Amino acid sequence: MSEITCFKAYDIRGQLGTQLDEDIAYRIARAFAQWLKPDRIVLGGDVRDTSEALKAALANGLRDEGVNVLDLGLVGTEEVYFATFHLGVEGGIEVTASHNPIDYNGLKLVREGSRPISADSGLVEIRALAEAHVYELVDGRDPSVPADQRGSYERVSTREAYIQHLLGYIEPANFTPLKLLVNAGNGTAGPAIDALEAAFKQLKLPVELIKICHEPDGRFPNGIPNPILVENRSLTSNAVLEHKADMGIAWDGDFDRCFLFDEQGRFIEGYYIVGLLAEAFLQKEPGARIVHDPRLVWNTVEQVEENGGVAVQTKAGHAFIKDRMRQEDAAYGGEMSAHHYFRNFAYCDSGMIPWLLVAELLCVKGKPMSELVDERIARFPSSGEINLTVSDAPAVLDAIEGRYAPDALEVDHTDGVSICFADWRFNLRASNTEPVIRLNVESRGDQALMERETARLVEVIGGL
């Protein structure tokens, strides 16, 4: 058996040459086909220099298992999700390393209906099959497979249908003049933005897009697109101010996450965007159920309930969010990590739907972005996620619960431990992949209290 080390909890990612190459991609494709037994699979790839070759290896592996391949070309992850459910095929693969370093690449796999495939729903079995078989390839394919038994290969595009789907989330009549600064980070978002811009013009939407770092470029001349890192935000922030934009939007490499900036160039934490999107959905679908994670909750719950919705809490992570949304028939699910999920998008996450909804909300409210979020930040100031390295995460969680729980109003174990008091609360959870615990603290309208309790928790954890 030949060990393959690029399998993670939710996807496949690895360093090129050592953990992932064309041979490994071929083996994974055949294993995926053996496990899923599909008729048709859609393939897409991001802008990285190695994505096209890895995609070709996947296509060969799938075809050698008799699978018919539909190649979408250069697309974001959510375009693979869309094509999978729109075309009614049995699965899809996106070649992407998203925001990982330039010497990495990876694969995101879904099955029919764009349902996720993760460690507890197929990845372990796919890895075992891939490790169990090594193939002698000639020109990238297995010569022992007769030509008439191979699957077909076809280039297709679903972008026009995808753009029309995106436009279904907004009401064009609601839009007033808006100037938006868009930063594709030289990733895969640029072509999709161009297609949306063309649709805006057709609809006569009064939306102007100012584009920076727009052209897809696998060398990433402006750095790896990862706006969640503080050092990567100034380019967008400064451009918002320079162009006097109403809002700034930046994406990661495969654009399944978007990050928003107000008209003052300030980065808006994902937590407060969840509340805005919940409000936007509830204006369109009164009484809808909204799923959220337990890290920071008070702002989301209040905005959902004030707008007549039902807030539902579940464990963080895309597999948990998507599963709970299906159970609840929820219209929207949001995580503070800037992953946003939509029922009408097969419960998948999208980096395009969120900013369209927030842009529409700005027009409906007639208020600048800063005013919308400042109200919420003042009501529920939060620490943002703080990562702390520890040697024994379970022991730290137990110790903190033992110290804080006796005086708490509520203790919740949905994900790690959440401990609530009258005026402040915190969530502490262990990372699945590294010796780190993640801390989030919020208060009811008291910035100083939030900062004081955050500092105290960090000090206590550091002393354990």
Image: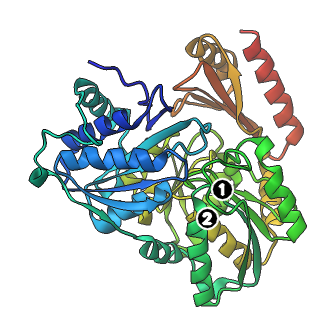
Residue at image point 50% right, 32% down? 16
In-image side of 261 versus 335 (left or right) = right
Question: Is 192 placed left or right of 451 in the picture?
Answer: left
Q: Which of the pair 112/370 is nearer the observer?
A: 112
In this picture, is 167 found above or below 247?
below
| SS type, badge 1 | loop
Judge by depth and name the residue closer to the eye, 91 or 417.
Answer: 91
Quarter of the image for residue 457 reads: top right
Residue 393, placed above or below residue 254: above
Task: Give, as a three-letter code, the residue at label 2.
Answer: Gly
Q: Position of residue 233 (x, y in %)?
A: 78, 49
Residue 104 visible somewhere in the drawing:
yes
Location of the C terminus (image quadrant): top right
**Res. 443 in view:** no
Q: Is residue 380 above or below residue 457?
A: below
State the image coordinates of residue 384 (x, y, percent, origin top left).
74, 39
Quadrant position of the N terminus in the picture: top left
**Marks 2 and 1, how far apart at CA:** 7 Å
Q: Position of residue 69 (x, y in %)?
A: 27, 57
Residue 393 lies in what quarter of the image?
Answer: top right
Disc 2: which residue:
190
Disc 2 secondary structure class: helix
Please tell me whether residue 456 is drawn above or below residue 369 in the rendered image. above
User: Of residues 177 and 377, which is closer to you in this image?
Assistant: 177
Asked if labels 1 and 2 touch by Cβ distance under 8 angstroms, the answer is yes
Q: Quadrant of residue 90?
A: bottom left
Circle 1 residue? 186
Residue at (56% x, 66% y) in the render: 353
Colour logic: rainbow
